[in-house]
Image (cartoon, rainbow, N blue to C red):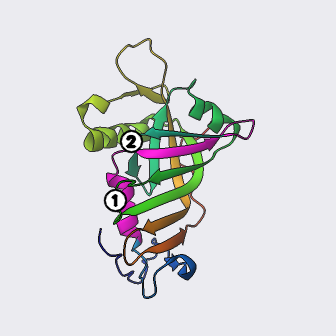
Amino acid sequence: MTTPATTPAPTPTEPPAELDPRYSSPGAEPPAWPTARDRLQTAPTLLLCTVRPDGRPHATPLLSVWLDDALWFCTGPDEQKARNLAHGAACLLTAADCTSDRALDVVVEGDAERVRDDALLRRVADAYVARHGEQWRFEVRDGGFHQGDPEATTALVFRVAPRTARAFVKGEPYSQTRWRFAAPASASGQGG
């Protein structure tokens, strides 16, 4: 991306863009939310940041999908990110391009909610295949994802609806934009 997009008037479901002039070139325009959302949808991986129970940060790259105005990811129940989310749901997901001086980086802040509804999880599983290919086909049962060995541990599935999102446009003109979202509705089948 060489220049930020001009933001049209937001739709009823699209949050207004707030350009921060302290961190933006004179005359910079904020990117439109659909542009930032597309970056989240097409990033090869996202970086998930959580907080350990003792307060230390934890970050890990992972695959995700965008569905129903939220990011979705899965993890094993014994992985550090799952243990962190059991302690506190707040997290960040980042799509960043560290190699380009002309890029759009997007950070989403929200709460990771575990989803257990098999009908909804089937839609998420289909989105994984559509986005990442057949090697990411999951069987859905018992409120989680399964792959390969039927005796293997169930992968937990989490939904993160944005509470806020920030976009960092690098290059000229550069800019920093924030979007604030209405409190997300919980997905069906939620639980601790």
Q: Do tag 2 and tag 1 residues touch (Cβ < 8 Å)?
A: no
For this rendering, which residue is in front, 184 or 54? 54
> How many tags in the picture?
2
The percent coordinates of residue 157 (x first, y second) are 49, 36
Name the residue: 48% across, 23% down. 154
Question: Which numbered disc, 2 or 1, marks the residue that appears first in the sequence?
Answer: 1
Residue range in magenta is 33-56
Q: Nearer the viewer, mark 2 or mark 1?
A: 1
Name the residue: 42% across, 60% down. 105
For this rendering, which residue is in front, 142 or 3? 3
For this rendering, which residue is in front, 80 or 159? 80
Is any part of residue 45 visible from this angle? Answer: yes
The percent coordinates of residue 84 (x first, y second) are 64, 36
The percent coordinates of residue 126 (x first, y second) are 31, 39
Residue position marked by numbered label 2 in the rendering: 124
Residue position marked by numbered label 1 in the rendering: 100
Q: Is residue 32 left or right of residue 91?
A: left
Does dot 2 land on a helix, a strand or a loop?
Answer: helix
Q: Is residue 30 magenta?
A: no
